[in-house]
Amino acid sequence: MEEYPEELRSPPVALVALVGCSEHHGAMTTHLLSHQPPINTLALPDFSKLTHLLQRSSSSPGGFLKRDWLVKHRTKIPAVVAALFSWDHVSGDPAQWVQVCSDLDDIKAAIRPKNTKLLLLVVVGKSEDISEDRLLALRKRAEVDSKYLLLYNPDPSQLDNSLQRLSASFAELGATFYKEEGRRIKARIEKNFSTPDLQVRYCFKVAVYAEFRGDWAEALRFYEDAYYALREMIATLTRLSPIQRLFEIKTVAEHLHFKICTLLLHGGKLNEAVTWFCQHIGSYKSLVGAPEVIFLHWEWLSRQFLVFAELLDSSSTTLPSTSSQPLGTDQLLSEWEFHPAYYYQSAAQYMMEKRSALDLAVSNSETFNENDDGSAESVIPSVYIGQFARLLEQGDDSAIQSITDDEYTRYVIAEGKRFQDNFEIIALLKKCTEMYSNHKVQRMGSLCAFQIAREYFSLGDFSNGKQFFDGVANLYREEGWITLLWEVLGYLRECSRKQGAIKEFVEVSLEMAALPVSMVDGIQSSKCGPGGPASLEQRELIHREIFAFISGEARLEFLNGLDDLKVTGDNTLHLEIDLVSPLRSVLLASVAFHEQIIKSGVSSLITISLLSHLPLPIEIDQLEVQFNQAQCNFIIMNAQKSPLEAVQSEQHDHRMESAPSLTLTTNKWLRLTYDIKSEQSGKLECTSIIAKIGPHFTICCRAESPASMDDLPVWKFENLVETFPTKDPALSFSGQKAAQVEEPEPQVDVTLGASGPALVGERFLVPVTIASRGHAIYAGEMKINLVDVRGGGLFSPRESEPLSLDTHHVELLGIVGAEWEDESRKGSDKIMKIQQSFGLVSVPFLKIGESWSCKLEIMWHRPKPIMLFVSLGYSPISCELNAQKVNVHQTLQIEGKDAVLIDQHFMLPFRKDSLLLSKVKPAPDSSQFSPLPLHESTVLVVSAKNCCEVTLQLLSMAIKVDDGATEKSCSIQHGNEDLGTAVLVPGEEFKKVFNVIPNLDSSKLRLGVVHLKWKRHCGIEDRSGLTVTDSKVVTKHELPDVHVELSPIIVNLECPPYAIVGDSFMYHVKIRNQTELLQEVKFSLADSQTFVLSGSHSDTVFVLPKSEHVLRYKVVPLVSGLQQLPRISLTSVRYSARFQLSVAASNVFVFPSKPHCNTEKRVEEPAAAAD
Amino acid sequence: MIVCVAVVGHQNNPLYIQSFTDADDALKLHHIVHCSLDVVDERVNNPKKSGPTLNETFLGLLYPTENYKVYGYLTNTKVKFILVTTDLDVRDADVRNFFRRFHAAYVDAVSNPFHVPGKKITSRTFADRVSTIVQSFGLSSAA
């Protein structure tokens, strides 16, 4: 597009001229340029210049359009001439007036032939009064309408206003001028006598005039008319020089087409523009022209595409919705026709055509015109668009002479030689590639890239070419387009050949030879690339060539003179084939261990399978199998070849195997099975297989597992017999290139000796014995872990947490009894780390047959089962850090249990009851504590029940208080702390009675903690020492808090301990008022059938403060046995509380007769008390 | 005249490609077929643009080249058929008809129990049948 002149590319801008009063021109010019639409200005200082400007040149037309016509109308021929007169002159003396008049006449004369419009501007001063007469006279003289005589006031206050009026008038007059011009020429068209040449010219002019005034629709219409008129002329090429004529027509058509497309695209009519372009190409494509200048045609076509692409490209940035517009109603256009890249691509395509045609034309011209007379010189573009002429210079004069077609041909060929089309083509294609890749259209992009690469290749720029070829080859490889890949690889092969890159050359050649090109889809074409036709024969040819080369038998003829590149001597050629390499089809190595887990030191089988898709069999001299454990590497020799010297010298430490034949045939697995033995535990993985062919060529092939082997990308779509890398098909599906080598069987026993439940609170000992059976233990380390059986994870809390009983229900306290026989020797590596649930201890060196033991001390804080893990890691051979370690694991589940369960309950003394108000009316907050009467003795029974399976021996039980405060608040009396030998079998309960007298009225009284000291009771004293060190364990039990209150009324029943039928006895009910108040107590006695009694049955008594009231009854029992005395129920009126003594308290045993036994004394005592 | 037909598999790999020209432009045709896959991809990935062709196997004109027209067809198993013709004025109905018959031939070919799905079609019968279909292209409408 850039090669078009500016006046063609941009829409025309109206032109006006300013004459006279040049000091004001600047302001006007600037203003008019900023006017919308802008107006260009010619500023002429004086009136004489104008006549020069408007001189008319006339000549008989010799072509369609003059080259300078457009530029003339844009820069030289004004539509409007504005004559500026200063008011001084207009209103001045007669001489001045005459001057004005004559100037005016000159202007009128000058502009008349061109029909240029005239505008009068009178520049007025600041405060001059304007005489209408003079203005009228001036207007008359100039013969202009009154509205085209303007007053121009340069005063800043008036300037804007004046300029506004000025530009409006200019625009109006300009439009009129162009309209009239257009109409004038249109009239000529309508007369219809004009020749087609003129027709084209007139239409063009009308269109340009329409453009001048912004009438785009009319412009478009007339451009199209001109275009059609021109198109019709092609049929009547009658002139003498058809080559030039055709070229001229095409050039003009190109201009017209450009204008039309620009207008269409500016109008947003994308569909129309594309359709128009298709028509344009369609109608001119076949106009090839004379064969010797056919390249002109291709060049022209290429330019059409390029220009249209550029137009589309630039309009796609301005048009907001190019993508939504296509494919509306017009289904004839596909979306690609709206893509500038498509046009760039076509432009490049035609440029290539042009280049080849030009090459042909150049060579023809060179052969036929040996004696070039230089007639192509001094040819210049003529005044008409698309024409060329010779400039004859004789001295200062020059004349234009038209040239013949022959001369013209020579001229264009000579011109054509000057350009480097290759770079232009590359630039175009690069643009395409970029655009395609922006739209993620990778295949078209890669086609362009391929073309770029071919251009570089033909230019001899192999490194650039290779870069592009590589990218393209990747896509074709990925998608399996073999024929296309073949072509690209052919170029790549040639590039590396030309560059002398032997390794790449060999790689590409091998890849080509291993491509699945068969007879079926091979292309027999002469238009193939440097790789030759894609066929089996060619593959075999390449194969032979390359193997002859690498075996050193033949040299490649292209390397003439480059001896150092020959693969000999120290120059070894080494190829690497990894998992994504395209060379996998050349050599594919699959390695399968027959067993997934192999024992250390035990030999197992491994199968190495090789596959090649090369067309001819290849013979491998030796194979080296490499593992991650280098000592397992081994070498397979081809038995048919004599061993290579190099192998014997450097690799003698590896195992050597021999195979009867190492020949790979096409698509047939070569399977080799060998023993493999590893001494080192862990992963044993085959890493690579190195095949050596000839003395200087090696291929290193990454080993692959048959189970996870990818298909060969280019071969997977081929219809081939499916083959398996191993004989056993199951192994082909599951075989792995890696196996796990197990560590050797440990020859050491670890025994955990403890059994039975552990009891909470004791230091439970778990004896651990490490006995060596067959291994000496070096650098032994024992790890101890305590784990929750229920899967609650390790007990080990975070390190930061403070040690508390809540977080460590079970705790590893230490390791005792670890006897290091020689402290000085082991001192340095003795490790002992103990945490709550983890321990690490080093084990001393043990010879075979020796043993070592220690004890783990574990303390349970809560009853909980745990799993104890002990793992011993040792090295059977030496103390080295990296030595092979053997691990022995041992686990033991240990139950943790509570030994004793301590409980307590309070009792009041027999037949005594206190009225406790909190019991009667329980307050909501104090209900949880059991109430105790103040200053009254209460019996506390503490029971300890053996709830484990071990017999315990209780040593002592005591209630201890923490501080002295409790000592005062209550007194606890009990018997001897020491319990002697109280043995508690499982399930048995032990009780101890305490007497508690609270001394302090308190709603919440702490009583203290029961300390129960016990130990495991075993028949044999020694055994207990074995498992438990500190055999005495203290179990603590916190007594619940009690509520102490003063009891207002205490009732005592007094009666003998037993009775005899028929014998009367006294039954007293003592009611003691402890308060300072008079207490009214109602009582009622229920009759009992087994007793006869005397006394009041029910009454209300008043008990004086701090005194006692006694109800007395004489009772005679009637029936023997355990009988219920008549029950008395009391009601305290003050507290409206009713209380009745418990049933047990009112029971008495009645003997049928007086018992005769020696219990007399005891009987008398209570009787005495009753009295 | 049809100059090239192709069957393209899921991974955009050619399963069958046959050109029917005497001229040495088989490679060029391969390139054209390969490039047309871009358009098929675009049509399939942006179904909105193609609007009415949604749910239709016939993809229509894919790709303009100077001398060829490329038509596409997408089977319900996402196998693509590509047709390259030199006729610049082709009736849609003819192309549809061609693809229908071609599809039938393809279905028969892959129904062969010895054919492995996803592999290249090497059946000679299929090739013969395709060339018959290609030769009869456009004739039915002319008759």
Image (spheres, helix red, strand yellow):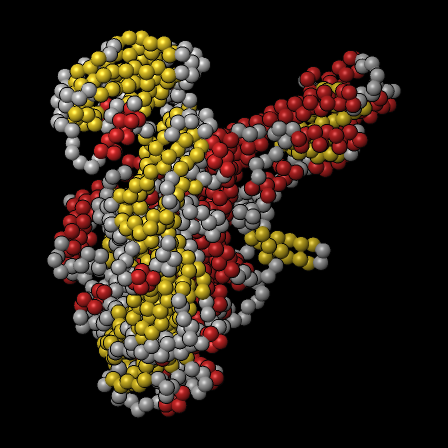
Q: Nearer the viewer, residue A552 or A187?
A: A552
Q: Can residue A605 be seen from the camera position used here?
A: yes
Q: Residue furthest top?
A: A1100
In the rendered image, the vertical position of residue A629 relative to residue A392, given as above or below: below
Residue in the image at 69% along x and 21% along y:
A165
Residue in the image at 37% along x and 44% along y:
A976
Residue A1027 in picture, x, y percent from top left: 33, 60
Residue A642 in picture, x, y percent from top left: 30, 91
Residue in the image at 32% along x and 29% along y:
A909
Left or right: A832 with respect to A734?
right
Left or right: A532 with respect to A966?
left
Quarter of the image where one finds residue A665: bottom left
In the rendered image, the vertical position of residue A446 relative to residue A1165, given as above or below: below
Residue A772 in picture, x, y percent from top left: 31, 75
Q: How many marks?
A: 0
Q: Can residue A297 be seen from the camera position used here?
A: no
Q: Nearer the viewer, residue A23 or B61?
A: B61
Left or right: A75 with respect to B18?
right
Residue in the image at 46% along x and 25% along y:
A1001
Residue A708 in picture, x, y percent from top left: 28, 63
Quarter of the image where one finds residue A538: bottom left
Q: Nearer the viewer, residue A788 or B118?
A: A788
